[in-house]
């Protein structure tokens, strides 16, 4: 599975601590093995899927888009607060 990332996603990941990066890597492995795991959004974000996971005992969201059978684009990661508002800007 080929993973593409947005600059926003890269900046967020740079700021994470090593333990948080390990939790994020585990979530990315789940998505890479089963891309349909995430919840499909509607409206402006109709092509986006969101996967919920725990990042250091805090519920976080990971937004991604399935480009084709062999590639995913990771859009954003973060807590629920203002997540969808910021995600619309990335789109």
Image: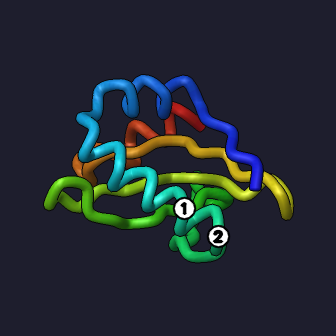
Near-viewer residue (43 or 23): 23
- Where disc 2 sits, the SS reads helix
Give the side of residue 88 with respect to residue 56, left or right.
right
Give the answer, above or below, for where 64 lies relative to 42: above
Give the answer, above or below, for where 14 lies relative to 53: above
Instruction: Choose top left, top right, bottom left or bottom right for residue 75.
Output: top right
Near-viewer residue (67 or 41): 67
Residue 41 visible to an observer of this rendering: no
The image quadrant where one finds the N terminus is bottom right
Q: Do the residues labelled 2 and 1 touch (CB within 8 Å)?
A: yes
Q: Where is residue 61 in the image (x, y as percent from the top left)?
A: 37, 56
Give the side of residue 12 with respect to residue 2, left or right.
left
Q: Which residue lies furthest to the right in this view?
A: 69
Q: Going 26% across and 49% down the picture, which residue do you hit? A: 79
Give the answer, above or below, for where 4 lies relative to 10: below
Instruction: Choose top left, top right, bottom left or bottom right for residue 32.
Output: bottom right
Q: Position of residue 42 (x, y in %)?
A: 57, 66
- Where disc 1 sits, the SS reads helix
Q: Going 39% across and 33% down the picture, which residue do you hit? A: 13
Q: Say which mark, if any, is on residue 33.
A: 2
Instruction: Choose top left, top right, bottom left or bottom right for residue 56.
Output: bottom left
Give the answer, above or below, for where 82 lies relative to 47: above
Query: Exactly how many numbered labels are in the figure?
Result: 2
Crowding near pointer 1: few (<14 within 10 Å), some, many (20+)?
Answer: few
Q: Position of residue 71 (x, y in %)?
A: 78, 52
Near-viewer residue (25 or 9): 25
The image quadrant where one finds the C terminus is top right
Q: Going 48% across and 33% down the picture, which residue do you hit? A: 9
Q: Position of residue 15 (x, y in %)?
A: 29, 26
Near-viewer residue (77 or 30): 30
Instruction: Please name the residue that numbered disc 1 is placed on.
Output: 29
């Amino acid at each position: 599975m080929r993973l593409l990332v947005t600059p926003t996603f890269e900046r967020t990941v740079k700021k994470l601590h090593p333990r948080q990066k390990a939790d994020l890597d585990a979530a990315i492995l789940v998505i890479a093995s089963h891309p349909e795991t995430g919840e499909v959004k509607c409206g402006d974000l109709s092509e986006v899927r969101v996967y919920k996971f725990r990042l250091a005992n805090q519920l976080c969201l990971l937004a991604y888009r399935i480009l084709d059978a062999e590639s995913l684009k990771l859009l954003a990661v973060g807590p629920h607060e203002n997540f969808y508002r910021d995600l619309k800007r990335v789109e």
